[in-house]
Image (cartoon, rainbow, N blue to C red):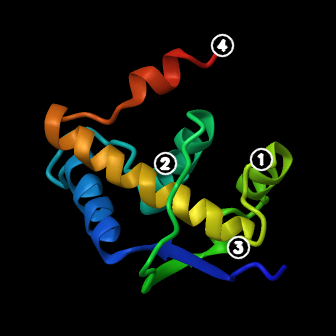
């Protein structure tokens, strides 16, 4: 099966990702030097959370925002290998398209949680890593 060279998000999830980054990153006027999150960070985290929590994502209707090169997003094929080894990708679906679906679902959930609480839902994700 042929894997895509680019993956992305629906326009709505792409807007939500941008909004999360704007809210989570420190302003440029901050006196402290801080680490800034980039889109890849949240995208990968959303995929990891989906895998860990056994999420079943829905197929995407519109991925017109395919802005991520797979070779940059997953340069060492870690995400690909995890999905492949866990055998969680449905038959007939390229693994990177499944990763794209996990990211879409996760980013939408992150955004909703952030709007309600002002933080990402990382407590459950990180506390249960034993």
**Percent position of residue 112, x then y:** 24, 45
Q: Which residue: 57% across, 76% down?
A: 7
Q: Residues within 10 Å of mark 3 (few under 14, many from 20)?
A: few
Identify the mark nearer the N-term, 1 or 3: 3
Which SS class for mark 4?
A: loop
**Percent position of residue 81, x then y:** 81, 53
Q: Which mark is residue 46?
A: 2
Q: Which residue: 15% across, 36% down?
A: 116
Note whether residue 89 is visible: yes
Horizontal relation, residue 104 to residue 75: left or right: left
Q: Which mark is residue 82?
A: 1
Mark 1 → mark 3, Cα distance in angstroms: 16 Å
Image vertical order of residue 127 relative to residue 32, above or below: above
Q: Quadrant of residue 13?
A: bottom left
Report the residue marked by disc 4: 130
Q: Which mark is residue 71?
A: 3
Mark 1 → mark 2, Cα distance in angstroms: 14 Å
Q: Quadrant of the C terminus?
A: top right
Q: Nearer the viewer, residue 13 or 71?
A: 13
Marks 1 & 2, CB-CB < 8 Å contact: no
Residue furthest to the bottom: 64
Which SS class for mark 1?
A: helix
Horizontal relation, residue 94 to residue 48: left or right: right
Mark 3 → mark 4, Cα distance in angstroms: 30 Å
Q: Residues within 10 Å of mark 2 (few under 14, many from 20)?
A: many
Identify the mark nearer the N-term, 2 or 3: 2
């Amino acid at each position: 099966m042929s894997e895509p060279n680019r993956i992305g998000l629906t326009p709505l999830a792409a807007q939500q990702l941008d909004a999360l980054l704007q809210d989570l990153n420190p302003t440029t006027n901050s006196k402290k030097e801080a680490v800034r999150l980039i889109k890849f960070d949240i995208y990968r985290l959303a995929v990891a959370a989906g895998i860990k929590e056994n999420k079943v994502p829905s197929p995407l209707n519109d991925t017109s925002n395919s802005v991520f090169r797979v070779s940059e997003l997953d340069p060492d094929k870690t995400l690909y290998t995890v999905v492949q080894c866990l055998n969680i990708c449905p038959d007939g679906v390229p693994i990177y398209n499944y990763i794209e679906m996990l990211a879409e679902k996760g980013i939408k959930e992150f955004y909703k949680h952030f709007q309600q609480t002002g933080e990402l839902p990382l407590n459950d994700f990180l506390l249960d890593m034993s």
